[in-house]
Amino acid sequence: MHLRAFTIYNILERNARSFPNGVAFCGNHGNVSHGQFKDRVDELSFGLIKRGLTKGDRIGVVAKNSLEYFILLGAAAKTGGLVVPINWRFSQQEIEYVLSDSSPAFVFADPEYQDMLLKIGSKAPSVKEWFSIDEKASLFSSFNALMEDQQGKDGTKVSPDDPFVIIYTAAVSGRPRGAVLTHRNILSANVEYAVSLRLGEEDAHLTTTPLYHIAGLGLSFGVMHAGGKNIIIPKFDKETVATCIEQHKATVMASFPPILANLLDEANESSKDLSSLRWVLGIDQQDTIKRLETKTNATFVLGYGQTEVTGVISLGTSLQKPGSVGKGGFLTDIRIVDEKDNEVEPGEGGEIVIRGPSVFAGYWNCEDETEYTLRNEWHHTGDLCKRDRDGFLWFVGRKAEKELIKPGGENVYPVEVEKIIAAHPAIREVCVIGVPDREWGEAIKAICVLEPGHTMSEDELREFVAARISRIKKPKYVAFVPELSRGRDGLVDRAKIKAHFGKV
């Protein structure tokens, strides 16, 4: 490694020296110290290299949060591999597309997804071997067998600007795009989290969000970098989360609706102690945030970010200006610009553009989209914002071409759902919009026009969608109408439709 270089694996080396006996991970597997974690990462690294992994190879993962998942991330950091964390909520078609696009050399999966992956197998010719993260009822090769070689030599040179993960995000085209994040990107985000939240070795992060989501991945590494511990749960369950906070004294967690509301209800019903919480990061309803800050010692942190900027570039609390997403981060330069990329005056709305070490390397296999997004040496987010005279940022919405719906913090482009619905023979045309939802923050609503002579129920439409893409993308609400509103140009008037049907 170069004298002044620093990578994610160097975090593990540093922690093993600085906090050798400090707890790095806890959960159903018991406690694992920073020293033990680094040893396990080394073992898996040697095993992967012996199986033929080389620098730049992709490693697909279809699995819930686990200690093995983190070990795999560490091994990729050491060997120069790129982890592709795949949304386990994706349909078979969506997972097949991600595997085809990313061409992984190896795929790791939980047993519950292995039957589906076997059906995909022949359509993913790049995969040399399939591994099971959990040994129970496995159809794939053993994860533990990879770690049987206790010794080995790894001469791989990894630099901070080498890619580390490819996270697939929703795309306007309806096909997910792989956002490539480097070691430097993750390290920069770690610094933002550590400084903004004053993280240290006494902190404990509860993994309430999945590792395929930048919020889950980023906050986990931020706490790890500070020498703290990650409390691993496979996925959100209100009873488990409330118990873990009380038992392991969690200090920080991420939350998207309905996580926090459900947690507060459970804590109230079961008298669980949430007093250890210091920070809850995410988005939520103001009344839920008020409940948190009234009933606990925690502060809710409203942030702005996206996968392409490694998760978060500004954080704001109710102690500053309620509703604001804060100011720009310590390593982030933010401008608000008009359509010609000219900076606007304070109080005026415009697009958020960003530069700094957290900006991603580009979209995998999408050179044109990368060039367009990173034009004029700024990352163009497609999001609209205002900056007040005190420097605080206020999120306004999204540019028309990047309209996005976020049920429970997931990213869903309307066109993605529209394409699926329009493929049904009973549907003449459809417009999909986002509507406010108390449970999920935002929900999907489909306004449909049927073909003459056809009938269809709301449930039939939902199941048709759920069979083809992730179930979280199916419409919660459906309306059948004689026709869709159109503008003078003859195109569907999405704004008018949203104004009319945007309330539930």
Image: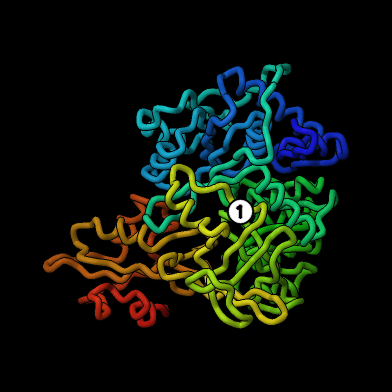
Q: Quadrant of the N terminus?
A: top right
Measured from the top left, where is residue 460 in percent x and y?
A: 28, 60
For the residue pair 45 and 394, the one nearer the viewer reads as 394
In this rendering, position of residue 146 left or right of residue 500:
right
Badge 1 element: loop
Residue farthest along the left direction in this orientation: 453
The residue that mark 1 highlights is 359
Amino acid under disc 1: Val
Question: From what the image shows, is residue 495 above or below residue 91?
Answer: below
In this rendering, position of residue 422 left or right of residue 238:
left
Q: Is residue 182 visible?
A: yes
Total number of numbered discs in the rendering: 1
The answer to which image quadrant residue 389 occupies is: bottom right
Question: From what the image shows, is residue 60 above or below residue 208?
Answer: above
Residue at 79% x, 58% y: name it: 195
Measured from the top left, where is residue 426 in percent x and y?
A: 19, 61
Are there few (<14), some (14-19), or many (20+) residues within 10 Å of tag 1? Answer: many
Q: In which quarter of the image is the C terminus?
A: bottom left
For the residue pair 20 and 496, the one nearer the viewer reads as 496
Q: Is residue 260 visible?
A: no
Residue at 75% x, 69% y: name it: 299
Measured from the top left, where is residue 323 in percent x and y?
A: 64, 77
Colour convention: rainbow
In this rendering, position of residue 350 left or right of residue 415:
right
Measured from the top left, where is residue 298 in percent x and y?
A: 77, 67
